[in-house]
């Protein structure tokens, strides 16, 4: 057992000074080995860093079928409640954040002036209707006058025919002396009078007919006046009804911005009404839109609810990027172009019957995740 040790000791002892023992790394190769190990370590660290960046940005080979964005908000049809006319506030029967139903009274304005305007419009309508009824009576009277003038004309024509016959007879009798010249002159004068009476009767008949036409024209004007007065009455009724501001739909009120006795102008913002119907608008980057489709399943978490998860569905995709709807659009032809990923709004419906979905409020920030590989909802399996 002691022989190998003795042999090894003897070999080491017999090695010349300054030479490398068998199996040992030469001294001049040790720095190269350290450099190689250091380079490999730095390379490994760099590779790990690149992989971490690729994973953080979801770039290949770590790209996912789920597209996520934090640029998303809960939306709702918030209705601004305001008066259609001006006046003093007479009643405010609601309070901040109160739930209301369609038709509930929110604000009532002082309606005394508008009641008087309605009474005035009704009185004017009665006057116009009376004038129209008077025109109807005038037409009946004018038509009766026409009949009277027609009868007078017939009588005048008969008298004229008789006087003409008398004149012809006397002209025949004057040759044999049966009729004197004086009697013939009287007959001629009478005939001329009857002819003039016929002309006068015809003129009177024409005047009576023109009177009827005048009455007809006046009736059309008065009928238009009655229609205008009737419209004025309806407008007065609408104004009177608008003194009562009611809820246009079910929902919850915001803060009440009007007080009893205050004077409000038409169109002033009095309060806001938030309905129960809500949805989510997610502003996705254009680089995320390749596989996004209507009907894809969505999950989103709400910051205000301790990141509680809800489910939804892609309902619509905007026809243009959000910048296209801005009032001041960027002009990229100025020479100072910087490429920025545009955002495409995506409307997401909230699936019904979810726990605590009633706690969602318009304006809350959410984090949206769209599963682009998921089966489209309402489509066959």
Image: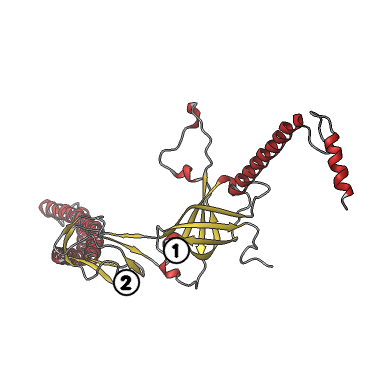
As displayed, is residue 26 above or below residue 119? above
Of label 2 and label 1, which has the lower sequence position? 2
In this orientation, does residue 144 appear? no
Single out the mark in the foreground, 2 or 1: 1
| Residue 119: image tag | none
| Residue at position x 54%, y 56% in the image | 316
* Numbered badge on residue 306: 1
Q: Are marks 2 and 1 in contact (CB under 8 Å)?
A: no
Near-viewer residue (313 or 17): 17
Residue in front for this viewpoint, 86 or 284: 284
Q: Nearer the viewer, residue 173 or 303?
A: 303
- Distance between the alpha carbons at the discs numbered 2 and 1: 29 Å
- Dot 1 surroundings within 10 Å: few (below 14), some, or many (20 or more)? few
Which disc is residue 100 wearing? Answer: 2
In the rendered image, the residue lying farthest to the top is 335
Q: Residue at x 26, y 56 (%)?
A: 269
| Left or right of residue 225: residue 381 | right
Residue 9 vs residue 86: left or right?
right
Residue 222 lies left or right of residue 48; in this view the side is left
Which quarter of the image is occupied by the C terminus?
Answer: bottom right
Badge 1 marks a residue whose secondary structure is loop
Q: Position of residue 233 (x, y in %)?
A: 22, 64
Please provide percent x and percent y for residue 14.
86, 34
Instruction: Report the front residue among 327 and 287.
Output: 287
Which residue is found at the position 49% from the left and 53% from the top?
70
């Amino acid at each position: 057992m002691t022989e190998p040790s003795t042999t090894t000791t003897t070999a080491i002892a017999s090695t010349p000074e300054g030479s490398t023992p068998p199996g040992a790394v030469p001294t001049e190769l040790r720095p190269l080995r350290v450099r190689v190990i250091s380079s490999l370590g730095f390379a490994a660290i760099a590779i790990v860093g690149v992989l971490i960046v690729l994973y953080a940005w979801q770039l290949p080979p770590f790209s996912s079928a789920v597209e996520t964005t934090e640029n998303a908000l809960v939306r709702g049809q918030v209705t601004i409640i305001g008066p259609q006319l001006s006046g003093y506030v007479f009643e405010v029967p609601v309070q901040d954040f109160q739930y209301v139903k369609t038709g509930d009274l929110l604000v009532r304005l002082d309606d005394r002036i508008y009641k008087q305007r309605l009474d005035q419009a009704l009185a004017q309508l009665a006057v116009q209707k009376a004038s129209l009824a008077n025109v109807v009576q005038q037409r009946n009277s004018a038509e009766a006058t026409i009949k009277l003038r027609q009868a007078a004309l017939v009588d005048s024509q008969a008298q004229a025919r008789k006087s003409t016959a008398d004149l012809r007879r006397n002209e025949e009798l004057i040759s044999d002396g049966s009729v004197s010249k004086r009697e013939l002159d009287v007959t001629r004068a009478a005939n001329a009078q009857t002819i003039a009476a016929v002309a006068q009767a015809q003129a009177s008949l024409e005047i009576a007919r023109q009177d009827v036409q005048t009455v007809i024209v006046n009736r059309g004007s008065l009928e238009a006046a009655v229609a205008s007065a009737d419209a004025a009455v309806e407008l007065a009724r609408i104004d009177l009804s608008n003194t009562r501001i009611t809820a246009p739909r079910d929902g919850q009120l915001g803060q009440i911005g009007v007080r009893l006795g205050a004077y409000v102008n038409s169109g002033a913002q009095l309060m806001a009404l938030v309905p129960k119907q809500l949805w989510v608008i997610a502003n996705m980057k254009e680089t995320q839109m390749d596989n996004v489709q209507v009907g894809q399943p969505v999950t989103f978490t709400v910051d205000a609810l301790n990141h509680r998860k809800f489910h939804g569905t892609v309902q619509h995709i905007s026809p243009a990027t959000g910048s296209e709807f801005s009032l001041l659009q960027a002009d990229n032809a100025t020479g100072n172009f910087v490429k920025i990923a545009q955002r495409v709004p995506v409307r997401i419906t909230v699936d019904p019957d979810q726990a605590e979905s009633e706690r969602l409020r318009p304006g809350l920030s959410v984090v949206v995740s769209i599963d682009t590989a998921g089966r489209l909802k309402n489509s066959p399996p």
